[in-house]
Image (cartoon, rainbow, N blue to C red):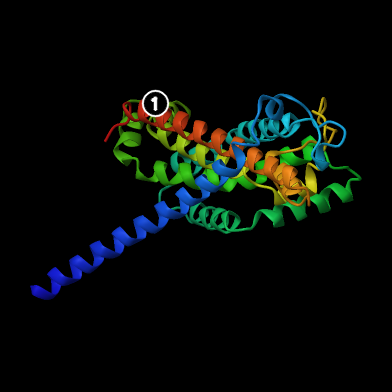
Amino acid sequence: MKFKFIEAKIAKLLMIISTIIVFWCVSSIIIVIAVKGIPAMSWEMISQLPGDGFYIGKEGGFLNAIVGSLYVVGSSTILGLLVSIPVVFYMNVYLRPDSRFASLARLAYDVLLGVPSIVYGAFGFAVMIYFGLRTSLLGGIIVITLLIIPILIRSMDVVAKQMPRDILDASFSLGATRLETIGVVLRQIAPGIATATLLSVGKAIGDAAAVLFTAGYSDSIPTSLSQPTATLPLAVFFQLSSPVEEVQNRAYAAALVLTIIILILSIVGRVITTRFSKNKIK
């Protein structure tokens, strides 16, 4: 009995220490970005395109990177949801819970989930070379879509698997078709869809390796899918690589904008998840 008490105390102490370490790491990152980014932040930075000599410390901003990130992330998230939601419904409504095909599909998505983003970028780059395509907004959207599809599917699938099977049985017993039952399932996994979307957006907007090979970089805002586009992670990378200290500080300002965007998305995601959770049958 005494040994179990000591074991519980040690486990509690380890959890407290782990929490403190994680909190310290996150706080350190935010503090460093804020301390170095806020002095370089100005309305010019977020409202203007890079001017002549921007990368040697002269006038201009990184509006091109902000708009480019929103283009890539917004489009890829919509495409990813259009592909992922039907897959999740098929695995959890049309297939049996113990289906071998569903198990193999989940294993495949788990493998894809662990593939580094630079591999997706290299794959997209190879495909673009084969078809004679240049770096473009379309290339970035397609690769980021492929990157986030496993995140969306596995996140939503976990929630769908936890849904009571009695809900499906009750729907079928009332004469509903499988297609009509999807509406019932949708209400139950809506919080999971919101969470999965939040996770995928956070992954997509912060990725640099995949878009480096496929989206390229440009100091202007793209007006078509065939033009290259800048993103905030690449803006941070290129500016931080500059030997000019003022340009390096602008990289921290871009990182601060990226952090604020992710924070806003997290808050919105929490609100949406809480709202949809009210309709969930437990």
- Where residue 92 sits: x, y (%)? 44, 42
The correct choice, above or below, for 61 with respect to 111 in the image is above
Q: Toward the viewer: 117 or 93?
A: 117
Give the residue at mark 1.
176
Where disc 1 sits, the SS reads loop
The correct choice, above or below, for 264 with respect to 102 in the image is above
- Where residue 164 sits: x, y (%)? 31, 40
- Where residue 191 sits: x, y (%)? 41, 34
Q: Toward the viewer: 108 or 91?
A: 108
Q: Tell me the residue at 39%/45% (across/down).
A: 161
Q: Give the quarter of the figure containing the N terminus.
A: bottom left
Q: Toward the viewer: 110 or 238?
A: 238
Q: Tell me the residue at 84%/31% (across/down).
A: 51
Say whether residue 178 is visible: no
**Position of residue 97 in the picture relative to residue 237 (left or right):** left
Q: Give the quarter of the figure containing the C terminus.
A: top left
- Where residue 212 sits: x, y (%)? 76, 48
Q: What amino acid is labelled 1 in the image?
A: Ala
Say whether residue 142 is visible: yes
Q: Tell me the residue at 50%/46% (across/down).
A: 31
